[in-house]
Structure formats: C-alpha cells, structure tokens
Image: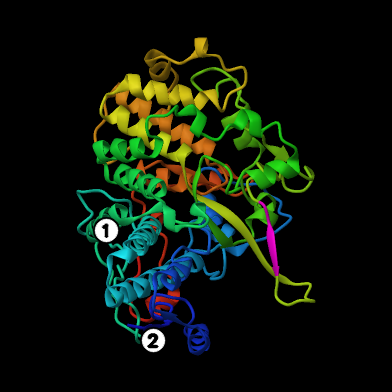
Amino acid sequence: MKVRYYIFISAAVLLSGCNDFLDKVPDNRTELDNAKTISELLVSAYPNRAYVEFCEAMSDNAEDKGVAIQSDRAVEESFKWKDVSYTLQDSPTGYWSSCYEAIAAANHALEALDKLGGMDTQAQRGEALVARAYCHFMLVNIFSQHYDPATADKDLGVPYVTEPETVVLKDYKRESVAKVYELIEQDLKEGLSLIQDHTYTVPKYHFTKAAAHAFASRFYLYKGDWDKVIEHANAVFGTGDVASQLRDWITHGQLSTSVREKEYTSAEQPSILLLASSLTKIARYQEFYRYGFNSSLESKLFRSAKVNAIGLPWAYVLEKWQADKGDPITMLKWKEYFQQIGINATTGYLYAMIPILTKDEVLLNRIEAYAMKKRYTEALADINAFYSKRTLSYDVSKNVKAEDITKFYADYAPLNPFYEMDTEQAAFVQCAVELRRVEFVMEGMRWFDVKRFGIEIVHYPYGMPSQKDVLVKRDLRRAVQVPSDAIAYGLTPNPR
C-alpha cells in the first residue's frame, strides 16, 4: 500500500506561524511506500533548532558582562528570566516549534509503518518512537517544572502528540508532567527494543542502540530510578575500558584552534553518540553576547586553586578573543556551517552540529546513580576515569578516594532534589553535578541540573549586585513560558 505523506508540521496551536505552515504544505509530499522512504522521512524526526543559548543564559553559567559586541534579545530576556518575545532560532519558541515538527515527522512515519505492515520495518518504528520520546522529553524539561513524584500529577506538562496532523487547527491540552513521563517511557521502551544499527548509513545522526540507551540513562536519572540508570549506562559502555571511550581533553587541548573547533562536534569523535544539525548562531556569536560566560566564571570553574577533588589543573582549553570588547571567552565547541540562500547570494543561514548525547554524559549519570545506590567503589572508578582524560599530569597514584570526595565537597551549597541523601551520597552526587557543569559549559546542560536540584541562582546587572534577582527552588520562572501563539490558540500558559 502506498501512503502519501503531507507535511502538516503539527497544528498551528503548537507552532509559531500558521501562515508559514500554510505556505509549505502543498509542495512537500513524499510517497511512503517502503522502508527507504520512511527512513528518509525520519531524518526530520530530530529537532533542527538548539536550546543552548537560552538555557545557558538562564543558568549560573552566565553573568552580565556589561558590554556586548553582539546583542540578542532571547539571550537577554532568558538571563533576566523573562518570557522570551523573540521567536526565531535560538529561542524557546524556535525550539518548541522544531520539536513538534520533528514529532510530526515521527508520527507520519509511524502511520505509514502501520499501513505498510511487515517485520522488515521494525527498525524504522524503533527510531520513530525513540525520537518522539526524546522530543517530548526535552519539551517537558524546558517548558515545565522538573519531575517530582509529589507534584508531577498536578504540574503542567506539554501536549503529547501521537497522531499525524490532518488539519491545520486542532485542540490540544497539556498533559501533566507525570503523564508525559509515562508516555515517554512507553515510547522509549518499545522503540529501544526495535532499533537496529545496521540500517543507518551515518549512525551518529540517528538513534542507535547506544544513543537510545544514553537517552534512557538521562530519562531515568531525572526520574530517580537508579537501577535503570546503571542498566542503560552499562549497555552504552559494555565491558570495555571506560576511560578510552571518553573524549580525551588532554589530546584535544593540544590541537590547533581550527582543528579543535572542527573536532569537537565531528561524527568521528568516539564519545559522541548522537549529533543534530541545528539552525543556530552560536558558532559565530555565543562568546560576544553581553550575558554569558566571563572571566569571573572561568576563574571559579577552571583556574582557581581548588577546581576539583583530584587537585590537578583541568585540561580544558578556554580562549579569550578581543579581550577589550565584552570579555568574550570561548571553548571553540562549535564549527559554523553557512548555507547560502541562493547560488550567488552573500546571505544565508548559520548552522552548527550539536552533540545531543555523549558517553561523557552517560558516565556522569552513572556516577550519580552509583552514589544513590551507595556503590562508592564503582562511583570512584568512574570519577577517576573521567579525571584521567581531563586533568593535566594525571597519574593513577593520584586517584581520588572516598574521603577526598566528601572533604572537597563538604562546603558546597547543599543540593535540593526531590529525594533524600545522606552526607556521603550528597558529596558524590555533588561531584557528578560539578563535573557535568564544567564538562558541558556553554552547551546549555547546566540549566537542567539547576532545575533538578533546586539550585538557587542570583543574576544582577553589571556592577550592581544590590539589584539582584534570585531564582529560588520551584520558582515559577523555572518553567519557560510556552509560545505566545500557542497560548493565543488556547493552550494553557505557565503561571507567573
């Protein structure tokens, strides 16, 4: 049976531009009559916008630098925890739209698979289900409060869309956070069991088994199911040496500037499990925004005498460009790709490859889970594996012990997750959280730990700490406001 796929890019109630949607529908159609065409459609089942800029700006990895070479409304409003009015790339609305577009592609693929039947398409079904789960997971963790079993059945989640769009306007309701997590888990478990890596030409751009397990390790970490975190993390690493599977910052830091910029997001990087091509300005402008990473944060996280429990300097490389213009600091994590709008055009679109899932993150997830299970020997093995690829002058004789961890993190501000921790658990979890912070600085990941652990943040205008704004635990602003167009079409807004 042939199935004609019309790109109804999820109804306008979920997206940001009804006119654009109507303009695109007539000319985008594909016959979904075999596994190959469905696989081609699933290339669109991944978000093509990035959360990096606005998530990083909301976190404690950003400060007001006072001067900007490049202004950006979404970054400024995110730093001030305002409802973001900018709606294009690198904005919450842009990311919301791209996720629901990706979900629409996954749903059309699933509909086509249902009509085609046959066991030879199970791999495509698996990819579609996991991609759909991932998009909803990112949406609920940006536009809702973090999962807490005590409140999740009452907290506003996001619409969980499981059917292809056949109309332009459709009524949607926000499920509870608990319901969204339930549906994510359902899709994830079914999809993971069906994925087959041999179907991919370039595996790093698709949910392979390893990438799906990595996503599962994050999902269960956020939910607090420690045994599941360990199970899925173990599936990623297998029985091989863990350290050799991580990004080697000692080697990476010795590369030339141009090579480092290219290599960080290369599909050849063994630690990367899933890459996404994103329409984003981060490669060109991130370090030049007024609100972002600065020298003060660099000193605190990377240069002070007490930056980690092993007592060795980090191998991470940070560079300052045009130091007289707004304190711009970069780690050269992004390689810009420029797409011209026409053959002879001088204007076009800026892209960058975003590592969505990595083995480095999975290791940190497992450290947390080991800590919560009080499996400290195994947690220490992972911590030392991490240090071995990220500290200068590392030697196994300098490996940290349990007492090093508890002593080093004793003075850190306590974390406030929804579950209880004793002193030793808290120290090891704090270690994982701080390692995650430095590992993914400038990537937006810190914001999710800020939400998970109720970390209190203070932002204030440059040079005016008396005008501070404090983001407390479960502050309503921790749930990013849903797009104004979605609200206009009747979707319930987040309370303010």
Which of 288 and 229 lies nearest the eye of the viewer? 229
Is residue 413 visible to the viewer in this orientation of the structure? no
Residue drawn at x 41%, y 39% is 362
Image spot of residue 260 (x, y percent): 68, 41
Residue drawn at x 50%, y 56% is 205
The C terminus sits in image quarter: bottom left
User: How far is mark 2 from mark 1, CA to CA?
Assistant: 26 Å
- The question of residue 337 being in magenta is answered with yes
Image vertical order of residue 307 relative to residue 203, above or below: above
Q: Look at label 2 and name its amino acid.
A: Val
The mark found on residue 63 in the picture is none
Q: Main secondary structure of the magenta part?
A: strand
Image spot of residue 258 (x, y percent): 74, 44
Which of 347 and 330 lies nearest the eye of the viewer? 347
Residue drawn at x 65%, y 30% is 251
Which of 250 and 319 lies nearest the eye of the viewer? 250
Image vertical order of residue 7 relative to residue 365, above or below: below
Task: Please report whichever mark, 2 or 1, sits nearer to the chain's N-terminal start.
Answer: 2
Q: Look at label 1 and name its amino acid.
A: Val
Q: How is the image coloured?
A: rainbow
Image spot of residue 325 (x, y percent): 77, 48
Image spot of residue 369 (x, y percent): 31, 33
Asked if residue 253 lies left or right of residue 152, the reply is: right
Which residue corresponds to mark 2? 168
Is residue 487 visible to the viewer in this orientation of the structure? yes
For mark 2, give the secondary structure: loop
Which residue corresponds to mark 1? 177
Q: Residue furthest top?
A: 397
What is the magenta range?
335-339
- The question of residue 344 being in magenta is answered with no
Query: Could you say which quadrant of the image residue 237 lies in?
Result: top left
For mark 1, give the secondary structure: helix
